[in-house]
Amino acid sequence: MALLYFIGFLIAANQGRGLLGSNGILPIPIFLKRTTFNNHPSIFYFKYSDELYTSLAWIGVAVSALTFFGFSDSFGPITSMLIWTLLWLLYMSFVNVGQVFYGYGWEILLLEAGFLAIFLGPTEQAVPVPVIWLYRWLLFRVMFGAGLIKIRGDECWRDLTCMYYHYETQPLPNPLSWFFHRLPKWFQKLSLLYNHLVELVMPFFYFFPSYLGYISGLSTILFQSLIALSGNLSWLNLISIVLCISCFDDNFFKFFSELPPIVAEGPTFWQPPVMFLVTAILLFLSKKPLMNMISKRQVMNRSFDPWHLMNTYGAFGSITRERMEVVLEGTLIENPDQHTQWVEYEFKGKPGNPQRCPPQVSPYHFKIDWQMWFAAMSDYRYHPWILNFVGRILSGNKDVIDLLKEDPFDGQPPKYIQAKLYRYSFTKNLKEGWWERTYLGLYLPPLSLDDESFRIYLLEEGLFPEEE
């Protein structure tokens, strides 16, 4: 859990200012004026500055690193609870002001799992049994919810053809995605049957003791490991594997080696009533995700309370059959025409140059790359943040440009930016490169800060270049 927090805080420290800073794509100060603390509780309601944002992110990195090496275990149960509460409150503060860039299932999953970690206690103390059952209940909702959303969603999950497309069209393919895509179709169907087994059958055995619990936990770990090998899904697979630890007990590990006698301290007088209260609250809050799972209108990856104590999960309810990519291009020419040579902007993770091997990113995450995948699915007016993104690049905003793989103009702001829409597909032979692409048309027309309508939009959004 500490490692997962470490990754999350590191992403905030490295990407936060460009995405959400005062001069970022979706500035937090503007967001705070449009919402309330009750809807999005966050430390930043009391005070916000880019310096504070970055400082708290690096504090989170440091505390989670210390916790990973056992610092939270060193000073008893109260200190342990305070440290894990600090991590949870800090990360929730980032998620609740993160807008679309923090709208992914693994963000709220980390918060829900992180809240339960507060009550695990230090190493020398016996783990409260209710916490283990709550972790299993969380794992059940993650896996069974994902299974239900698939069966109720795209027909390719029912006719076992989804894997024909998934590896090629997923948000951020990795170096092995090309090879998974080229596996025989009979194997793709067989793997999807395994998917349904793990997501729709095995979750019920998480609650069984001994061998049934072990088998269900191991099956889920194998399943999540294979998904992690085939693409970049941030830390979703890693946190799912962490949750599986709750399926195992000391008897399981005795299969591998003889364990030394364990003498665990009992709880202090105040811990049982606290645990009873927390369990009662979480069971009460479980009603909404439970009703959501059995509903024909099931939603996925949604919180039912602003503190993210009890959420619903799911992934890939539908599968796109073709991969669309938005490619940004810029020019230094004052008055571009049909003969102008445009230069492409390369992103750190998403496909761009067809010859470039898809990088291994996970468990890290490039948030702007992920959002570009969503943007390619529909008109830019459904994704207004992309206009903000273009405006910041045109103004030469370094924090935003640092989100890209490189600046093709070496710090000189372009005069115009446009975006083209391409269809991407894996090549049949790696000698031809990794991708082949077909131009489909303009996604965004050439935009300039001298464009009056674009300038008015940026002014209305409070996003005009800093010097203005």
Image (cartoon, rainbow, N blue to C red):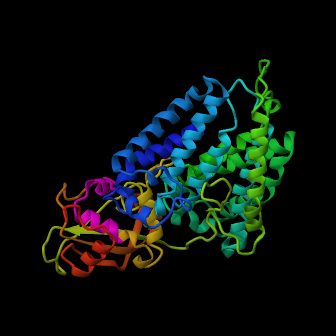
**In the image shown, does 405 or 44 lie closer to the viewer?**
44
- Image: magenta residue range: 387-406
Residue placed farthest to the left in the image? 334
Q: Residue at x 50, y 46 (%)?
A: 8
Is residue 239 positioned above or below 189 on the image?
above
Give the quadrant of the N terminus. Answer: top right
Q: Is residue 343 magenta?
A: no
Which corner quadrant of the image does residue 276 belong to? top right
**Towards the viewer: 192 or 364:** 364
At x 33%, y 65%, the residue is 389
- Where is residue 16 drawn, in percent x and y? 39, 52
Q: Residue at x 78, y 68 (%)?
A: 294
Give the farthest residue toward the front.
Answer: 46
Q: Does residue 247 appear in this view?
A: no
Looking at the rendered structure, the number of numbered marks drawn on it comes to: 0
Question: Secondary structure of the magenta portion, mostly?
Answer: helix
Rendered location of residue 138, percent (x, y): 72, 51
Residue at the location (26% across, 63% down)?
393
